[in-house]
């Protein structure tokens, strides 16, 4: 049965066609090797048979989310992964020592071994979507003030020296540091028309903020939400959401150069092609892809 599932999934990736229904759609994590970061992407290697929002310190181990739980997997053995803890939105530190995650409206951290689990948040507001800086000296996370107001906060890994860098009357989703540690990229529906769809997905765009000055810059005007930045050249790979003719939300995978604004498609027409995440070397790209069982 498992072989049949994998065969069907591989065929779907090769065809790359439009999906005609959402139906049941488990998410699987895949890794793209450096030589396959051509345009368009050529192939994938399976990391896990289920799950999404993968994060890795290198290409050897990855932490991912599935059903409100976090698991650690070793790429190449897709059905062999171990439970880590309950939570979501994991982010593995560059040195491999800690994993940040969200649980019960708060930011937590845990060792990859499952030891030293610790709650970091001490706020009356919900805090989520944590992410490390490239040098491991800072973290950034989202703070939800109200349904119509969100903040992005930069802090030390122990949650000291907090600094609010974004405070807007809109959502500020999935913040990630640039390699220089001076800018943060995120998705937001700021300046866009409201959407009746979940999380305003097709109506979000990519923005980045200068941490020191607090100035915000809009990167896309035709969609963008989940983004990741490559270490050596600031190349951004992101998911661009859209709506199929039958009303189903789909996702393209694209890249953009933040300096020139050059924008190019990697893969198009999938139900879900989300949560892209480079490992810290920038050599491997982890993505989640929807498929049917």
Image (tube, rainbow, N blue to C red):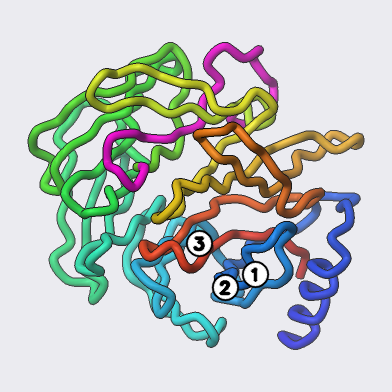
Q: Is residue 23 above or below residue 3?
A: above
Where's residue 56, x and y in %?
A: 39, 66
Q: Is residue 60 left or right of residue 153?
A: right
Name the residue carrying label 3. Answer: 66
Disc 3 secondary structure class: strand
Magenta stretch in the rendered image: 178-199
Identify the image quadrant of residue 288: bottom right
- Foreground mark, 1 or 3, reads 1
Pointer 1 or 3: first along the chain: 1
Residue at position x 26%, y 60% from top? 93
Residue at position x 40%, y 52% from top? 88
Q: Is residue 17 above or below residue 75?
A: above
Viewer-proximal residue among 276 and 102: 276
Residue at position x 22%, y 66% from top? 95
Where's residue 273, x and y in %?
A: 67, 53
Quadrant of the image containing the N terminus: bottom right
Identify the image quadrant of residue 120: top left
Give the CA distance from mark 2 to mark 1.
5 Å
Magenta portion: prevailing SS class? loop
Name the residue carrying label 1. Answer: 36
Q: Is residue 183 above or below residue 31?
A: above
- Residue 136 numbered tag: none
Viewer-proximal residue among 6 and 279: 279
Q: Residue furthest front?
A: 260
Give the CA distance from mark 1 to mark 3.
26 Å
- Residue 33 numbered tag: 2
The answer to whether the residue labelled 2 contacts the one labelled 1, judged by CB atoms less than 8 Å apart, is yes
């Amino acid at each position: 049965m498992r072989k049949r599932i994998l065969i069907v999934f591989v065929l779907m990736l090769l065809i790359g066609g439009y999906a005609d229904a959402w139906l049941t759609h488990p998410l699987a994590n895949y890794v793209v090797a450096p030589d396959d970061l051509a345009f368009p992407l050529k192939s994938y290697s399976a990391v896990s048979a289920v799950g999404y929002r993968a994060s890795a310190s290198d290409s050897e181990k990855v932490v991912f989310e599935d059903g409100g739980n976090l698991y650690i997997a070793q790429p190449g053995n897709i059905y062999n992964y171990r439970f880590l803890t309950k939570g979501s939105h994991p982010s593995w530190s560059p040195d491999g020592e800690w994993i940040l995650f969200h649980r019960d409206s708060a930011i937590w951290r845990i060792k990859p071994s499952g030891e030293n689990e610790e709650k970091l948040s001490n706020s009356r507001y919900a805090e989520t979507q944590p992410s490390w800086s490239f040098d491991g000296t800072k973290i950034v996370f989202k703070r939800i003030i109200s349904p119509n107001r969100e903040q992005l906060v930069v802090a030390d890994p122990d949650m000291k020296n907090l600094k609010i860098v974004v405070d807007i009357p809109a959502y500020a989703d999935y913040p990630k540091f640039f390699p220089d540690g001076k800018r943060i990229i995120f998705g937001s529906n700021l300046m866009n028309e409201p959407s009746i769809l979940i999380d305003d997905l097709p109506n979000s765009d990519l923005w980045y903020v200068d941490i020191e000055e607090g100035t915000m810059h809009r990167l896309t005007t035709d969609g963008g939400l989940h983004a990741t930045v490559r270490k050596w050249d600031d190349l951004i790979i992101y998911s661009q959401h859209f709506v199929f003719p039958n009303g189903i939300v789909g996702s393209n995978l694209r890249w953009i150069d933040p300096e020139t604004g050059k924008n190019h498609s990697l893969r198009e027409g999938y139900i879900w092609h989300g949560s892209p995440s480079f490992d810290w070397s920038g050599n491997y790209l982890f993505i989640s892809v929807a498929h049917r069982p």
